[in-house]
């Protein structure tokens, strides 16, 4: 029987929270998007605007959550964030118009960021207290788990003859069920270890500038494929089941990616691991449009899933190596760099697709950005402080 303070229970609670708030609340837009574009006549530019609104909300939410005002109320904020995510999924099902969709997705991004920050604060503190940091992989695996579940939801909905509005209702129901599970699993707030010490200001060394450039380019490069890969499948006349398979492969790979990459991280360090992750992802991003369907999108989804979660984690670790005494400030600055790239990506990708009529040029630009990110990440690790 699991004890009340079991680190496994907290890691499982983190997995469910990440599945709801990120895998479903943030990324289910990707498999639902083609149906919305078809039924509502949305252009790729419209879709990019809606996606960017979500990522802007995520960036703003992460910045607000990082100010330290929520000390002592992290657990209720996790619950509220997940409840808001469920409600906003339902709101998408009864809405119309690019502006209203963008507003809803903006607030969904804020909810995702709050969930991410406050759940990590709780879960990681209990894992550290139990000396079970290895269970962080279970926590991060929730993103991929949610993506995989969302692919099955949309596939089942399509097979039953339902449309995109029912997809959003199903997402709301799954999110509500996940909230119930999180309430049962995460029943305590974070472990306190005294008041947080004041951190020194950021020192803008050449290496830290390079790692932020790499992180911003990663945000730009991954998000174009993460937003439009199912639309790419549909544009190549892929079946609904192929759309579901591509997104399921992405999610399943994401769920196990941290475990798979951890040995390399231990041997080579975060800079080499980050650079290699960006390079591998660049191959997948390019493959999604260069290789014919279904091979291209399947390989793209596989390599996207295997890399985007671990690159996010490795980037923060690299930043902390460079500035070990300013860890919270490092996370805030790098989140901003990542967020800016993530906001710009769908806007550029969507409007380039409007002009060219497909996603090839936008996607290849994303792949090129990831190659440059790999070079900056590798260079940043050549001279450690």
Image (cartoon, rainbow, N blue to C red):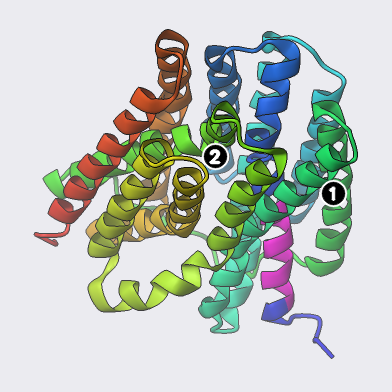
Which residue position holds label 2? 62
Q: Residue at x 49, y 73 (%)?
A: 259
Quadrant in the picture for the C terminus: bottom left
249 or 201: nearer the eye?
A: 249
Which residue position holds label 1? 174
Left or right side of 315 for 260? right
SS state under label 2: helix
Closer to the eye: label 1 or 2: 1
For label 2, the crowd category at 10 Å Cα-Cα, with few meaning under 14, some 14 to 19 and many 20 or more, is: many
How far apart marks 1 and 2 lie (CA) works out to: 24 Å
Magenta segment: 9-19
Q: Return the x and y of residue 330 as percentages of the image width and height.
A: 35, 49
15 part of magenta stretch:
yes
Q: Is residue 72 visible?
A: no
Q: Which quadrant holds residue 204?
A: top left
SS state under label 1: helix
Q: Which quadrant holds residue 138?
A: bottom right
Which of disc 2 and disc 1 is earlier in sequence? 2
């Amino acid at each position: 029987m699991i004890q009340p303070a079991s680190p496994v229970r907290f890691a499982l609670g983190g997995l469910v929270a990440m599945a709801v708030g990120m895998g479903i609340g943030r990324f289910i837009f990707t498999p639902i998007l083609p149906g919305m574009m078809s039924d509502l006549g949305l252009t790729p530019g419209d879709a990019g605007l809606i996606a960017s609104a979500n990522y802007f909300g995520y960036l703003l939410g992460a910045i607000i959550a990082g100010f330290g005002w929520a000390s002592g109320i992290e657990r209720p904020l996790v619950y509220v964030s997940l409840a808001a995510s469920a409600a906003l999924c339902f709101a998408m099902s009864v809405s119309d118009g690019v502006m209203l969709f963008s507003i809803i997705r903006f607030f969904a991004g804020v909810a995702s960021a709050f969930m991410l920050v406050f759940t990590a604060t709780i879960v990681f503190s209990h894992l550290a207290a139990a000396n079970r940091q290895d269970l962080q992989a279970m926590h991060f695996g929730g993103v991929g788990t949610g993506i995989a579940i969302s692919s099955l939801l949309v596939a089942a909905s399509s097979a039953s003859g339902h449309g995109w509005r029912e997809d959003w209702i199903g997402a709301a129901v799954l999110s509500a069920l996940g909230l119930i599970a999180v309430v049962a699993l995460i029943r305590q707030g974070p472990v306190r270890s005294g008041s947080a010490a004041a951190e020194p200001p950021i020192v803008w060394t050449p290496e830290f500038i390079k790692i932020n450039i790499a992180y911003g380019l990663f945000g730009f490069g991954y998000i174009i494929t993460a937003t439009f890969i199912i639309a790419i499948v549909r544009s190549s006349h892929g079946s609904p089941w192929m759309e579901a398979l591509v997104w399921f492969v992405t999610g399943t790979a994401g769920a196990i990616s941290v475990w798979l990459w951890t040995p390399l991280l231990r041997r080579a360090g975060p800079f080499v691991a980050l650079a290699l992750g960006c390079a591998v992802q660049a191959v997948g991003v390019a493959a999604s449009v260069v290789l014919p369907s279904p091979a291209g999108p399947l390989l793209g989804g596989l390599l996207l899933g295997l890399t985007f979660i671990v690159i996010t984690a490795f980037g923060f670790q690299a930043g902390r190596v460079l500035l070990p005494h300013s860890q919270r400030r490092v996370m805030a600055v790098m989140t901003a760099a990542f967020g800016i790239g993530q906001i710009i990506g769908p806007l550029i990708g969507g409007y380039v697709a409007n002009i060219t009529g497909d996603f090839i040029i936008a996607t290849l630009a994303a792949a090129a950005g990831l190659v440059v990110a790999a070079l900056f990440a590798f260079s940043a690790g050549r001279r450690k402080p």
